[in-house]
Amino acid sequence: MAERKEGLFKINVENLALDQYNPRLYGESSKDKQEVIMEKIYVREQIEELASSLAVNGYFEEEPIIVVPDDERDFENINSSNVNSFSYVVIEGNRRTTSVKLLLKKYSFVDDNFPKIEAKTVRDSLRQIPAIIYKRREDVDTYLSVRHISGNRKWDAFAKAKYIFDKVNSINRELPAPDIEKAIQILETRIGDQSNIVKKYYIYFKIFQEIDDHVIDYSTKHIKDRFSLLEVSLAAGNTSVANYIGLPPFKKINLNGDLIDSTHVDNLRDVTEWIFGKDEHGSGSLINDSRQINSLLKPILQNKEAVEHLKTYADLDGAYELTNGEENLVVGNIKKASKLLDNILAKVPKYKSHPDFINSLAEHQASLESVRKLMK
């Protein structure tokens, strides 16, 4: 049963440490110093608007943060009179806490345009933050799960997937007999998940791990930032992308061991490069928008000829044209060429002496002559 202190406590800002395991930070901060964590939140979370409100209005007590003692053994001794004799880790409210810390003290990484506190009364009010104190991190799990996975304050796709993956594995370790499916069901029950969110995101993260382990040799940050594209690509395993990498429908999937077998690793590499690129900067990515996955990539992966074209030429549009069959490709391109020529007829006299126009026209005439010969 979750253990927490009754009521709200006003805790000094300097007694509050930001969470090194904050899912928003992709699990990258477990060894980071506090200033580094603050900088990551400042850069990634766009907290200027939040800080601006705090700088003018102070902190609303209606939005307490959630903390645990830095040393769990201190919990029993904490009360309203000695609360600031202890140190705490912020489990929920790291953006708000960071905003307050940056308003109260100048840091080198903060832009000069960052909001500033004008009123002394506001500055004084921000020196303590209202908080709810739980005994241990695990006591807050259900609240965080409901709020950020199925509730109205959802984390981004990667943060959600990593949190679910870690939580399922934690539950699994506590079972008498390890069973990932059972652990998933337990977490689903805890957060009231009726849409298989937990299982889907567990699988998305497991696929991400296999990409990291077997496919790429560069920083995964670019993939983490575009993690939602994995969700679009795989859905519940009933897509041509999932089929191409050998991933069965999620209802039938075996979660023990790797999800992608050795015969499909090259296909997983193909998909990774097409969607995310060949390096940490996304170079070579063919997907600029998630809609291209559904409208272009998925139809392509249902057609062998289109797949071979994509693998050979990295030409997404050309590969898509092949999905309609060779006949449609030939007739469609003839119609397209005819329409393009019709569009410029009125402007031909203006450019009839232009060298580039003359050369291009000669090339088109030669191509047209070749077509005529082939038709005989």
Image (cartoon, rainbow, N blue to C red):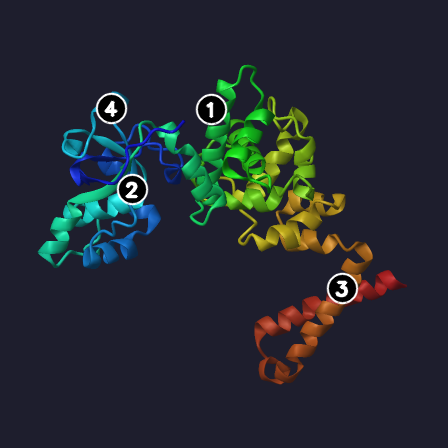
Question: Quick one: label 4 or label 3, which is nearer the N terminus?
Answer: 4
Residue 129: x and y, percent?
21, 44
Q: Please, what secondary structure does the residue beneath circle 4 have?
A: helix
Residue 262 lies, with reference to residue 8, above or below; the image says: above
Q: Callout 4, which amino acid?
A: Glu
Residue 352: x and y, percent?
62, 80
As drawn, the label of residue 170 is: 1
Question: Quick one: label 3 or label 2, which is nearer the N terminus?
Answer: 2
| Quadrant where the image shows the N terminus | top left
Residue depicted at 64% across the width and 40% down the height: 236
Q: Callout 1, which amino acid?
A: Ser
As drawn, which residue projects farthest toward the top?
Answer: 176
Q: Which one is nearer the viewer's eye here, 320 or 236?
A: 236
As drawn, which residue projects farthest toward the front?
Answer: 6
As drawn, the label of residue 332 is: 3
> Does residue 169 appear to the left or right of 108 in the view shown?
right
Q: Please, what secondary structure does the residue beneath circle 1 have?
A: helix
Label 3 to label 1: alpha-carbon separation: 56 Å
Label 3 close to label 1 by CB (< 8 Å): no
Q: Callout 2, which amino acid?
A: Ile
As drawn, the label of residue 76 is: 4
The answer to which quarter of the image holds residue 23 is top left
Q: Nearer the viewer, mark 2 or mark 1?
A: 2
Question: Quick one: label 3 or label 1, which is nearer the N terminus?
Answer: 1
